[in-house]
Image (cartoon, rainbow, N blue to C red):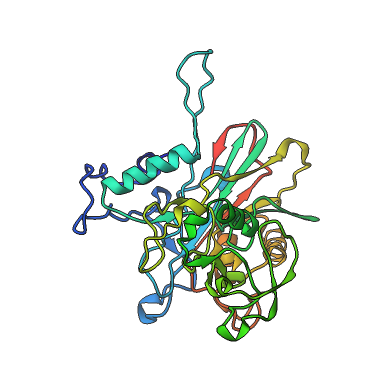
């Protein structure tokens, strides 16, 4: 699935501009909102946004634009970075043809070869950058969830919370990244150390024993600090502050072919995987209830809400709004409002997400047997 195919398939507007040689004056592809947000509306409570410059209205599809399965969707832009929501979404039905052996077939793929196509398209249009991807496809009674990045999908049922994806960050893929640096030390250009330490080492630590971890270790051990250990660590920081080569907070995604460590020629791309992790949910084996949903959201939501908090909101809201035909849309809006420090928010006091947030709430009960993609 190339970037051009994605935009032509799901985004409105004129055809893409013809490729041009890369250069500092090359114009980027114009920003376009997802097709299903044409005629979008702000959620209740955002009507006074024009009088509150710090307000970020939550956007959702217009009431007359129902998404497949009556799924709910809502988004909010980054608070301090951009006037756009950089977490782009798409939702639609896919047509897959069954062909005889040897005939041309249509496939939706997310693989290293397609990542190279994206890289060439970005270069041809004079753009740089990358993205993560979280995709759910329903096909013949099964839900396939593919994740390459730090977004997350969970299944919420009355008595179950089931993770359907897991974030790929420098922390969660520490051993893979360290092993790559062990096999190809030239990737560090002599500027970084692949070893991980609980804190940044200083000159005073030379000769002292400190805790460390290497690629073959699941736990910590001790070593005596050498001069090479004082280099900047390959993975630095913890939690949301963890960075790969001091630059990137994710370890899988698409693009970023030109990304380099600041003021160096050290590339990050060799450490980034475009191969997603795929989880398969056999929907046909579940005794589905009307309030069983899949929640897909970008990291802006999960930075402040846990799986359990999201499940609590789902279980509190849906049973009380059984007769509302727009309840899944309203639930998506409510999940975003819950990240904005509202009084009824389940997050800790003062815990607010300033990042972009995009949320899908997908009901599974009435999906039927048709093949759909979200």
Residue 191 in picture, x, y percent from top left: 47, 67
Q: In the picture, residue 318 is in which quadrant?
A: bottom right
Residue 268 in picture, x, y percent from top left: 45, 57
Residue 134 in picture, x, y percent from top left: 54, 50
Q: Which residue shows up at 61% across the image and 49% down it?
A: 362
Q: Which residue shows up at 54% across the image and 55% down it?
A: 149
Q: Nearer the viewer, residue 76 or 40?
A: 76
Q: Which residue shows up at 74% across the image and 60% down it?
A: 218
Q: Which residue shows up at 68% across the image and 61% down it?
A: 314
Q: Nearer the viewer, residue 172 or 374?
A: 172
Task: Say if residue 233 shows up in the picture.
Answer: yes
Q: Residue furthest right?
A: 159
Q: Residue furthest left?
A: 25
Numbered circles on residues, count: 0
Q: Quadrant of the N terminus?
A: top left
Residue 104 is left or right of residue 327, and the answer is: left
Residue 187 is left or right of residue 351, and the answer is: left
Q: Nearer the viewer, residue 207 or 161?
A: 207
Residue 133 in picture, x, y percent from top left: 51, 50
46 vs 178: above or below: below
Q: Nearer the viewer, residue 196 or 114?
A: 196
4 vs 335: above or below: above
Task: Say if residue 296 shows up in the picture.
Answer: no
């Amino acid at each position: 699935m190339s970037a051009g195919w994605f935009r032509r398939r799901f985004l409105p507007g004129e055809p893409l501009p013809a490729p041009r040689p890369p250069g500092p004056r090359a114009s980027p592809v114009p920003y376009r909102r997802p097709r299903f947000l044409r005629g979008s509306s702000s959620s209740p409570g955002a009507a006074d946004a024009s009088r509150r410059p710090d307000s970020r209205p939550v956007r959702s599809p217009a009431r007359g634009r129902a998404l497949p399965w009556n799924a709910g969707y809502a988004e909010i832009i980054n608070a301090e970075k951009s006037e756009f929501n950089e977490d782009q979404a798409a939702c639609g039905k896919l047509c897959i043809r069954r062909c005889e052996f040897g005939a041309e077939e249509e496939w939706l793929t997310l693989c290293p070869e397609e990542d190279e196509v994206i890289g060439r398209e970005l270069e041809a249009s004079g753009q740089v950058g990358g993205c993560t991807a979280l995709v759910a496809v329903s096909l013949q009674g099964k839900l396939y969830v593919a994740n390459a990045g730090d977004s997350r999908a969970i299944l919420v049922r009355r008595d179950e919370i089931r993770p359907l994806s897991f974030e790929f960050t420098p922390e969660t893929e520490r051993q893979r990244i360290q092993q790559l640096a062990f096999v190809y030390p030239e990737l560090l250009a002599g500027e970084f150390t692949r070893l991980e330490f609980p804190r940044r080492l200083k000159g005073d630590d030379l000769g002292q024993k400190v805790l460390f971890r290497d690629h073959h270790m699941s736990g910590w051990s001790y070593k005596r600090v050498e001069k090479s250990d004082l280099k900047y660590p390959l993975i630095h920081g913890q939690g949301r502050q963890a960075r790969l080569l001091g630059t990137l907070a994710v370890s899988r995604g698409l693009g970023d072919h030109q990304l380099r460590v600041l003021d160096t020629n050290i590339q990050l791309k060799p450490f980034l995987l475009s191969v997603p992790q795929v989880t398969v949910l056999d929907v046909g084996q579940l005794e589905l209830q009307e309030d069983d949903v899949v929640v897909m959201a970008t990291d802006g939501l999960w930075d402040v809400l846990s799986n359990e908090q999201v499940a609590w909101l789902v279980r509190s809201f849906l049973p009380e709004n059984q007769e509302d035909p727009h309840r899944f849309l309203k639930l998506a809006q409510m999940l975003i409002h819950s990240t904005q420090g509202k009084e009824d928010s389940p997050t800790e006091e003062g815990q607010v997400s300033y990042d972009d947030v995009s949320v899908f709430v997908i009901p599974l009960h009435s999906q039927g047997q048709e093949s759909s993609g979200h």
